[in-house]
Structures are given as C-alpha cells and as structure tokens.
Image: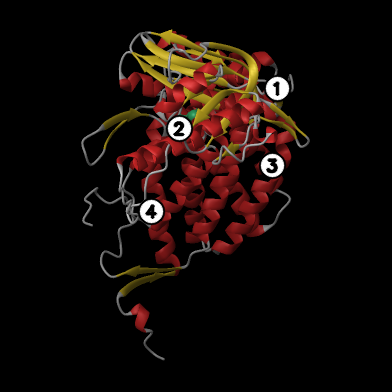
Amino acid sequence: MSEVPILKETTRSTGREALRNNITAAMALAGAVRTTLGPLGQDKLLIDDEGRTLVTNDGVTVLESAKVEHPVAKMLINASTTQDRIARDGTTSAVLLSAELLQNAWELVLQGVHPSAIARGYRLAEDACRAHFDQLVIDATPERQRHAARTSLAGKIHETMQHHLAELALEAAQAIQEERPSGVVVDPTRVKILTQTGGSMTDSRLVTGLVLAKKRVIDSMPKHLKSGKIALVDGGLERRELMSSVKLNVTNTGVLEQFRQQEKAMLLEQVDHLVSLGVTLLACKEGIDDDLHGALSDAGIQAYRRVARADLDLLARGTNATLNHDIGGLTKRDLGVFISSRNERWNGVMHWIVETEEGGATFIAKGSTNETVGEVVRCFADALGVACQLLEEPSLLPGGGATQIALARHLRRFAEGFAGREQLAIEAFADALEVIPRVLAQNAGLDPLDSLLQTVAQQSTAEDGQGHFIGMNIVEKGPANMVEKGIVEPLRITRQVLAGATEAALSVLRIDDVLWAKQDPTVPDMPESDDES
Ligand code: ADP
Ligand code: MG
C-alpha cells in the first residue's frame, strides 16, 4: 500500500505551504473587491463571454461573475453569496474581513502559533463580539429606518433617487409584513417588480396590490371587479392534445364534429363548476380555449391566461388561494379572496391590478435605458432588504467603521483575560476588524492609518457615552458621530458579516492538505479568464 493510486495524478501541498497558497488566494480575491467598498468605492466594469457589460460596485456581483477556480477563493465567494442571501448587503465587507482574518492568522503561523490555536482564539473573539452587540445597538426608529435604507444605497445611485427609493422600500416592506406566531415576517420576494423602459428613473413608483402587464382574455369580460373569489389554475382550460400514438379512424365526417362538441361540452362543464363556486376572477398558467371566452364573459368572470408561475404564486400568497391543476376538482377551500381587480392602460399597455387583504405591493422600476432600469431594480432590492430586516429585527448599528472599531477596542480589553496564544489570536481578530474603516478611508482618498488612529482616539476619549457612534465621515473627511449623520446599518447585516467571515476563515485554517488533480497545481490567485472546457 505504498502508492495510493488516486494520488498518482495529483500534486500535493501540505501544512504551511498549503495554508500559504490558500491565504494568497483569499488575499487576491479580496484585492479584487477592495476598491468597491463604501460610498466612494469605485465601480467595476464586468464583461462576460458574449461581450455583455455591467457596471457595478456590488461585491457579490463582481465575485460571482469572476471565473475563479481556486477552491479557497470559491469558499470565500460562497461566504459572500450566503451573506447576500441572508442579509442582502455587506458582501464586500464579508470577503474583506475573511481575507484579513486569514492574513493575520498567517502572521501568527510565522511566529509559530498553530492554526488550531488561532481558530480557538477567533471563535472566542467572535463570541465576544456577539455578546457585545447589546451595548452597541440602537433602536430602529422610523427616522433611522429611513437613514439605514439610504445608507444601503450610498454611492450606488444619485442622492435624489436614494431618498426616493428608500421611501418606497419602507412603504413596500410595510405592505407585505405578516404577523406569525413566531413574530413579524417580512419576505421581500412578496414585492412584485415590474420594469418599464422609457421615462425618468424618478418616476419609479410603488403600487398597492399586485400588478401584471396582462389584459383580460376578451374585452367583453368585466373590466373592474369589486371583491370576490379567485381561482388559480396551474394548467389551462383547453382541449387535451391527442397523444401521437392514438389513431382516430374517422369513418364519417360527423364523428369528428361530435368529438369536438363533446370536448367543448366538457370544458363548458368546468366553466359551470367555476360559476357554481361563485368564482369571478380566474388566472390560468396555460391557455383558455377560444370556445370558452363567451361563456366566461357571460358568467361575469374576468379571466387571464398564460400567467407566469411566479405571478400565480404571488397571487396565491396574496389571496390565500391554492393552486390547482384540475378545475373539475376545485372546492370552495381552494379559492382565494380579493378586494378589487381592475384593468388600466398605462403608456399604451394594459395592466391588471389586483388588491388583496394580505397586502402585497408592486414596484414599478423606470429608467431611460435597460441599464438604468436594472440599476434601479438592484438598488430598490438593497433598500427593500434593509427595510424588511428592520421590521423583523428593529436594531441598528452605527456604520462608517464605527462598530468595527468599537468591537476591536472591546476585544483588546477582552484579550487581556487570556494567556499566550489565544490572546494573540483575539488581538489578531481585533486588528482584522479594522480592515473595514481602513479601506473605507483609503477609498475616500484619506490616509488609512491616520484616519483610523484619529477615530479610535475620539471613540476612547468621548465623555458622553457615545464613543462607539464615532466612525469615518468620508464625505467631510474626518471622524464624526455616525448616528447623527444618519449612517446606520441593520444589526443583522453586521452580525452576519462577522459570522460568515469567521466561518470562512476557520474553514480555510482547518485545511492542511491540498491535493490538486493533474495540471496546474499552484494557481493560488485568480486565473485569467480563459475557459478551455
Ligand atoms: P458591502 O458590500 O460590504 O455592503 P458597501 O460598498 O455597500 O459594501 O459599503 C458598506 C460600508 O460603507 C459600510 O461599512 C457602511 O457603514 C459604509 N458607509 C456607507 N455610507 C457611508 C458614509 N456616508 N460614510 C462612511 N461610511 C459609509
Ligand atoms: Mg452595501
């Protein structure tokens, strides 16, 4: 058993060498997004295989589009993607922090500290930060919620739009909040996004209810319905297609006609069934046979066909209806209720607007080009993410690096309670947290070290008990009270950045053996984007 066959075709790096390669990869990745952090961060121009372009300063977008092959870099990208999923923001910070934690770990390894001791210290430090959040949080008053939504848009879109989108996001979040036994739940996917190219982005607006760019099947159907019952069909009201293996031997012309009539009668029975249930609004995923339009219209039903599955789901959530494939089998319990359903022509396009008890809202994103509409949609989603989180967990932390500096100060005191190597690791964690204020300062053209030292000094000498509010005011280029300046962020984002970055760093520290299949064993940094598959 001297030669393990599976290792024949591999190159292996172990121990320190493996760790060094992995950390180099993490640093390279952080380098790619470093300059995008903060409102004065720079944009990146992304170009895909087909030459399509996107200008963004969103960390996770940059990372997800990069063709990264190094497994450790991929782990960090995963951390950033998780951050995006859970908190919708803080993606750049998560990558910067995990890379910094690794860089500092490496310095300790060089001094002879074993990675497992570092990992222990890092865990202790993260727990200590979590426990300290209580001392730092402030209540998310409505005014501060507005500030937080705007902070999430800083540097991404011009100021008038920041204000506008922040208001709309808060309003939308209110419209979709649900009271559950476990507490308030606000799911941003309940807001429908409708895009319209043309006009100014400042015309973007929020409409109560669900809006679909659809018209009712025929004009003779009612244009406006006041409250009633809705049926949602996960199929259609159509003649079944004959299976190709079935042969119909038509011996006399009447047979085919009879067959058609029978089918029509069966479909009409389904319409009768809907009428008997008292349905006045119908939405189908597939088609509705032409032969039925008249009957539906006569029954006073407003019907829609080819409604996208995602829209049917939103309708189901808003009306409490259940999606059903078989109309014949529909019962009263499957039906939902709506407050109103109407058709309106906007810029020459018919729209269907449904208002329901359960709320729901539609954001209409406008812009002169597809690119600007896309930008408006992305920004709205960011602000909506913040607004939803704040309804679920109404706690905020000061931004602009203030919280990270306060946590680092706390950790340095906390570290004194430990001896030896763990103390070193906790201090290394504290130093790593300061990457956020340092990079914010750097991206604003300030000296990172001077700015950091000034801010730390002001935090520690503040006598009003609000030292931890002091962060980098990168617009006025000096330390300032972030809460007064309205630069605040949901606790959930900062807490998740910390958790995700620590987790990613720890999983890299645990690796001491890397086996590369066949070629190209050493690519520690991001390879050029030549796809050879
Ligand atoms: P991320 O992807 O990590 O969210 P961003 O580019 O959105 O990265 O930058 C977020 C950071 O910018 C946060 O630390 C936030 O506190 C900070 N920030 C936002 N606005 C300001 C401001 N006006 N002054 C200082 N820092 C700010
Ligand atoms: Mg952000």
**37 with respect to 530 (left or right):** right
Q: Residue at x 51, y 54 (%)?
A: 105
Q: Secondary structure at mark 1?
A: loop
Other residues around mark 1 within 10 Å, as few (<14) / some (14–19) / many (≥20)? few
| Disc assigned to residue 175 | none
Disc on the earlier residue, 3 or 1: 3
Image coordinates for residue 470, horizontal then vertical, percent: 61, 23
Numbered label attached to residue 308: 2
Residue assigned mark 4: 24
**Of callouts 4 and 1, the N-terminal one:** 4
Question: Disc 3 residue type?
Answer: Arg
Contact, CB < 8 Å: mark 4 with mark 2? no
Residue 466 badge:
1
Would residue 148 be visible to someone looking at this image?
Answer: yes
Residue extending farthest to the right is: 181
Q: Which element type, helix, strand or loop, lies under badge 4?
A: helix
Kind of residue at badge 4: Thr
The CA span between labels 4 and 2 is 46 Å
Q: Amino acid at mark 1?
A: Gln
Question: Separation of disc 3 and disc 1 at Cα?
Answer: 19 Å
> In the rendered image, which residue does mark 3 sit on?
130
Q: Position of residue 178 (x, y in %)?
A: 69, 28
Give the crowd class for mark 3: few <14, some 14-19, many >=20 residues within 10 Å: some
Residue 495 is situated, as x and y percent measured from the top left of the image, at: 62, 38
Is residue 396 visible in the rendered image? The answer is: no
| Residue at x 27% of width, y 51% of height | 527
In front here: 462 or 196? 196
Between marks 1 and 2, how big is the CA–CA gap?
A: 52 Å
